Image (tube, rainbow, N blue to C red):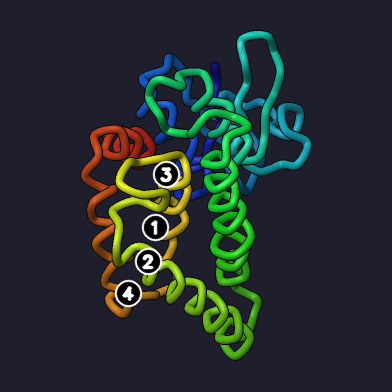
Amino acid sequence: MKLYYAPNTCSLSPHIVLRELELEFELIRVDNKSKLTVDGQDYRTINPKGYVAALELENGQILTEGPAIVQYLADLKPERELAPPAGSWERLRLQEWLNFIATEIHAGSAPLFNTTLPETTKDIFREKLFKRFDFLQDTLAGRTCLTGSSFSIADAYLFTVLGWCKWFSIELHNWPALLAYQASVTLRPAVQAALRAEAPN
């Protein structure tokens, strides 16, 4: 398998999951501005959407969209329990979390990357995002992971998007459960390995 990624993006989530599952894969860096891979290929020929992540399978199929990729990966090694069995109620709860992260945290953060937006407009997006952080604070105050006590693919995704707060000068100290959660996930060997692999040379 090949994972197409760019540093400091949502592709970190499937990267972490690949390492958690100890699957063999090739990591291929994409320049988000030029849309070229490290070897000069036009990334848009791989993923016409133009953004990471993309997972190229052994049969040549290309899978895009982080929540779809991480579920596919988790199902390759169900014994690692990064996702409950497909069709179960617990799997639906996991998908509920993946959708929440995608639409409310990931998409909710996206406008803050836009350097052309005035700060007054960004304040509106921050206020909405902070309400979602309040919800996560209440959820994580009583547990170590989103779905309970064990790490799941939803945690890989939430950890990834929470990591963007530093780019927006958002301090998580107002949400101590989120701060503790982020620190705990950071210590996972697979997370450390993914962060090292994506660090600038």
Query: Nearer the N terminus, badge 4 or badge 1?
Result: 1
Q: x%, y% of residue 9?
A: 51, 49
Q: Are marks 2 and 4 in contact (CB under 8 Å)?
A: no
List the residue tagged with mark 2.
Answer: 166
Question: In the drawing, does residue 161 fall left or right of residue 182?
Answer: right
Q: CA distance from mark 1 to mark 3?
A: 11 Å
Q: Is residue 102 above or below residue 156?
A: below
Secondary structure, mark 4, is loop
Q: Are marks 4 and 3 in contact (CB under 8 Å)?
A: no
Q: Closer to the camera: disc 4 or disc 1?
A: 4
| SS at badge 3 | helix
Question: Alpha carbon of mark 4 to alpha carbon of mark 1: how far?
Answer: 14 Å
Q: Which mark is residue 10?
A: none
Amino acid on which disc 3 is placed: Ala
Residue 12 falls in which quadrant of the image? top left
Q: How far is disc 3 from disc 2 in space, using C-alphas?
A: 17 Å
Q: Are marks 1 and 2 in contact (CB under 8 Å)?
A: yes
Dot 2 or dot 4: first in sequence order is: 2
- In the rendered structure, find residue 163 and report the number of the disc placed on it: 1
Q: If you read the primary sequence from the N terminus, does the residue marked by circle 1 or circle 3 appear first?
A: 3
Q: Residue tagged by mark 4?
A: 175
Disc 1 is placed on an element classified as helix
Q: Is residue 116 left or right of residue 177?
A: right
Q: Which residue is mark 3?
A: 156
Q: Residues within 10 Å of mark 4 (few under 14, many from 20)?
A: some
Distance (Cα) linking label 2 and label 4: 14 Å
Q: Rate crowding at label 3 as few (under 14), some (14 to 19) or many (20 or more) other CA atoms within 10 Å.
A: many
Which of marks 2 and 3 precedes in the sequence?
Answer: 3
Q: Nearer the viewer, mark 1 or mark 3?
A: 3
| Pair 3/2: label in front | 3
